[in-house]
Image: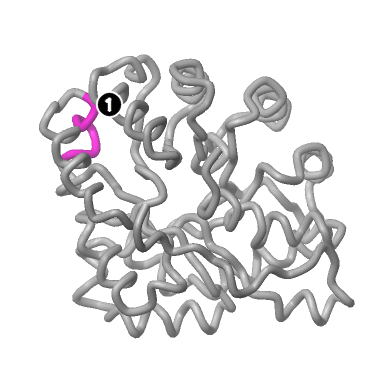
Amino acid sequence: MKNVPLILLLLIGGSFVNADAYAQTPIFDAHVHYSQPDWAVYSPAAIFRFFDEAQVQWAMVSSTPDEGTLRLYELAPQRIVPILRPYRTRGDMGTWFKDPSILAYVEQRFQKGIYRGIGEFHLPAGEAKSEVVKGFIRLAARSGIFLYAHTDEIGIEELLNLEPKVRILWAHAGFSATTQKIGLLLDRFPTLFVETSIRNDYASGGKLNPNWRDLFLRHPDRFMIGSDTWTTSRWESFVEIHKEIRAWLNQLPPNISGNLSIHNARRLSAEKP
């Protein structure tokens, strides 16, 4: 694909010198939206000021409509990995998988040649076999991009079973899926990746949850972090969100925290299967 925003200039090694050095390490945020309600409040330049304050060097961005993603990408293509969201308006969120015009829209937008994934899309359980979703699968298989799905553990398994070679990024770690279930799915499906935004069970009382720690150690190359700026008010807490993420990341071995904070998202964005 032409003009793919590969992150090639900075590839930090497998360990960091100390906690202070880690605290200064840049982050790859795998879940950012810059959707239409945000535009009147924060300019693209203001968004990058948030990034800089939070030490977010790169971000996967999808937006409703796609114009928001393009505004950020055009200002700093070396920092933005565009993900094509299949929503022309927010009204598409609950019906896109039944609407053939969505597939035509995605195929037309995809011709820009910049997108590394399709999503984040909301997929109810039982809808993975719709013709629109199958069209996304075909496009992903043909182009080497990934699908970014917001769904529960039933929906993600249905999606994974459609085409085992297509990589799937699971938003919010399924929200309520248990670490046991997530681990079983990761064991079964080598093309499943997990993004950790929104959930609040990674740490309690400042201490990393041991079940999550064990899962991160068990699958160190499959997780990535995100903020999910799904509403404008999330930008107001963007810096604090990343402080909280760093607090539990810093309790992992440096090579594992480096994978979650940068390397896994970089690899998923830059590589074909």
- Looking at the image, which is closer to me, 3 or 31? 3
Q: Disc 1 designates what residue? A: 135
Number of numbered markers: 1
Residue 10: image x %, image y %? Answer: 64, 73
- Which residue sits at x=79%, y=54%? 256
Residue 6, position as x, y percentages in the image: 49, 63
Q: Is residue 93 magenta?
A: yes
Q: Is residue 135 magenta?
A: no
Q: Would you say 201 lies left or right of 96 here?
A: right
* Left or right of residue 160, residue 266 in this image: right
Q: Name which residue lies at 66% across and 61% down.
A: 261
Span highlighted in magenta in the image: 92-97
Say above or below: 256 vs 55: above
Q: Residue furthest left?
A: 101
In which quarter of the view is residue 206 placed?
A: bottom right
x and y, in percent, of residue 25 in the image: 70, 75
Give the image location of residue 11, x and y in percent: 68, 68
